[in-house]
């Protein structure tokens, strides 16, 4: 490394390290040091490193560590990552690393295995070199998995470790091909189980990112069942990544991405830059744009699971996990129509993931389209062993088991989530408009506000209420009383130096007015 310290302070946050790529080579080097230690600490299990900045601009990049079962890095290690990355000299770095080896009682010469991958960003190869040289310096067994989506790397990590892990069923063949085959096989299985399932088609805006390459590889395996058309699949021009397209653009702007000319009532989807998020949408005959976001995906999935579990004759507690950003109408639909519980957690998928794992079948999605469904081991075991009474019961059990294979349970996965949406629509023979009509969203608005010090904004109740500044929450409460069905909250972003203001109400005018008043209050 030419530098001995990063040019600016970096923090391992909800999205791992993320910054302008030019600051990151030394950070990736230190991520490599930590990854080797993490693997050794876990008895030589394989850990993953993903190099990506997801939906952020092309000049950014980042790194996330993946734990052996494909989960995000254990939260208690985030502080070690931050401390090590910010060492001010090589001597300090080595001293800190030695201290961590001693603290955890880890031997330097024990087994360490790390697998890593990157997205399509131009800065990827330089960061891979920095990571690889750190792994080499640590005598770690390193595997370069090349260019992958983030969820594919999570899949590989889990599949590698569960090959020989007592108490854990093998997650699949630990190769990229194994991933495609697992998805395609389970989709095909469902198509043979569900009566009269028709082929479906979808146009996918891939944000000019890695999702395009991977969807092209999957597509031939699903020929005759799913017809994919790729839009924004240009990975040869790195500057085009996420530019006027992708899931974040579509969700934030509530409009079509560039290069998509919609046919009314047809289904469209957008992935983000590393294909761990997906949102869907369609236009009606009058040209109106309708977003089917993470909340709509969660409700679609939860309703199918309720139906199939009830047909299967098993008892499974199904629940949905949301954040404060979930539209209030979706929460009401889940609680009052589907009659299943909703749990709220703070923003950030690791919180949602942990809460979802407490259910027999836990559905979690952020409104922005990041999420998945978790099947508890006891649920899968009881589905596999229950006495089967009728063919209809058997069919539902088999559909549920195949869905548990179709869904990437390690982390939100745009490709796998999209297949889940498609298969549910196909089972029900629903158009996008039928899906959309389950509930009508409350009007909402999401604003950002620059403040002097965002750490002054502390919250409680899964970020839905402010604790400090003390005088603000009573004013928000007062405001909510003035508008029917309204809700507003303020929280500090975990990924940007801003506070976010969310408002929802019965009409767009009211949602806008509330947002404007809150912005004034923040001045
Ligand atoms: P912050 O910046 O903390 O609001 C954003 C998203 C999260 C999550 C993280 C991680 C919103 C409102 N917030 O968090 O949902 O995806 O980024 O990338 O969409
Ligand atoms: Zn992403």
Image: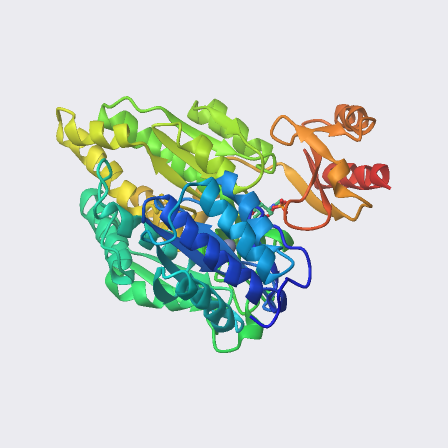
Q: Is 64 positioned to the left or the right of 5 in the image?
A: left
Horizontal side of residue 504 vs 171, given as left or right: right
Q: Quadrant of residue 78?
A: top right
* x and y, in percent, of residue 388 in the image: 13, 26
Pick the residue in front: 55 or 91.
Answer: 91
Q: Which color scheme does this rendered protein use?
A: rainbow
Of residue 8 and residue 247, the one placed in the foreground of this image is: 8
Residue 443, quarter of picture = top right
| Quadrant where the C terminus is found in the figure | top right
**What residue sits 49% from the left and 24% below the top?**
335
Residue 213 visible in rendering: yes
Residue 499 percent coordinates (x, y):
73, 43
Residue 277 position, x and y percent, is: 48, 52
* 279 vs 345: above or below: below
Count the marks.
0
Q: Quadrant of residue 258?
A: bottom right
Between residue 59 and residue 315, name the one nearer to us: 59
Residue at 20% from the left image edge and 37% from the top image edge: 398
Q: Is residue 402 left or right of residue 38?
A: left
Q: Measuring 22% from the left and 54% from the top, which residue is drawn there?
A: 173
Q: Which residue in the rendered view is the most extreme toward the bottom?
A: 236
Q: Percent from the top left, x then y, of residue 401?
A: 23, 38
């Amino acid at each position: 490394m030419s530098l001995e310290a990063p040019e600016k302070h970096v923090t391992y946050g909800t999205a791992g390290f993320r910054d302008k790529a030019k600051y990151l080579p030394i950070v990736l080097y230190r991520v490599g040091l930590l990854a080797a230690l993490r693997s050794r600490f876990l008895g030589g299990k394989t850990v993953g490193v993903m190099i990506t900045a997801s939906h952020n601009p092309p000049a950014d990049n980042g790194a996330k560590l993946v734990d052996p079962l494909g989960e995000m890095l254990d939260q208690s290690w985030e502080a070690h990552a931050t401390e090590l990355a910010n060492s001010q000299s090589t001597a300090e770095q080595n001293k800190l690393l030695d201290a961590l080896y001693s603290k955890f009682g880890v031997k330097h010469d024990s087994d360490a295995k790390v697998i890593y991958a990157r997205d399509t960003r131009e800065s990827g190869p330089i960061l891979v070199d920095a990571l690889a040289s750190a792994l080499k310096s640590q005598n770690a067994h390193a595997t370069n998995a090349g260019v992958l989506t983030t969820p594919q790397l999570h899949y590989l990590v889990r599949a590698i470790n569960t090959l020989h892990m007592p108490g854990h069923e093998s997650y699949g063949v630990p190769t990229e091909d194994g991933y495609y085959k697992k998805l395609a096989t389970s989709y095909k299985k469902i198509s043979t189980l569900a009566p009269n399932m028709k082929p479906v088609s979808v146009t996918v805006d891939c944000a000019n990112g890695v999702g395009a390459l991977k969807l092209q590889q999957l597509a031939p395996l699903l020929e005759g069942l799913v017809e994919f058309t790729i839009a924004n699949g240009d990975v040869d021009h790195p500057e085009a990544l996420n530019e006027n397209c992708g899931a974040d653009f579509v969700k934030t702007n509530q409009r079509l991405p560039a290069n998509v000319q919609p046919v009314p009532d047809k289904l469209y989807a957008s992935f983000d830059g590393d294909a761990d998020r997906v949102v869907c949408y369609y236009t009606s005959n009058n040209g109106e744009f309708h977003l089917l976001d993470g909340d709509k995906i969660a409700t679609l999935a939860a309703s199918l699971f309720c139906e199939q579990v009830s047909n299967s004759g098993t008892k499974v507690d199904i629940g949905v996990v949301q954040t404060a950003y979930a539209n209030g109408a979706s929460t009401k639909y889940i609680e009052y129509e589907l009659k299943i519980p909703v749990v709220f957690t703070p923003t950030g998928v690791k919180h949602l993931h942990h809460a979802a794992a407490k259910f027999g079948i836990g559905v979690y999605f952020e409104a922005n389209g990041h999420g998945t469904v978790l099947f508890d081991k006891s649920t899968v075991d009881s589905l596999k062993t229950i006495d089967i009474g009728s063919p209809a019961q058997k069919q539902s059990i088999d559909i549920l088991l195949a869905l548990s294979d179709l869904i990437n349970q390690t982390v939100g996965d745009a490709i796998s989530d999209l297949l889940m949406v498609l298969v549910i629509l196909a089972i029900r023979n629903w158009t996008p408009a039928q899906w959309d009509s389950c509930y009508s969203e409350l009007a909402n608005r999401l604003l950002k506000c620059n403040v002097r010090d965002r750490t002054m904004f502390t919250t409680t109740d899964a970020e839905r209420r402010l604790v400090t500044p003390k005088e603000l929450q009573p004013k928000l409460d007062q405001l909510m009383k003035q508008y029917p069905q309204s809700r507003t909250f303020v929280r500090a972003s975990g990924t940007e130096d801003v506070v976010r203001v969310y408002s929802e109400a019965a009409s767009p005018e009211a949602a806008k007015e509330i947002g404007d008043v809150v912005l004034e209050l923040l001045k």
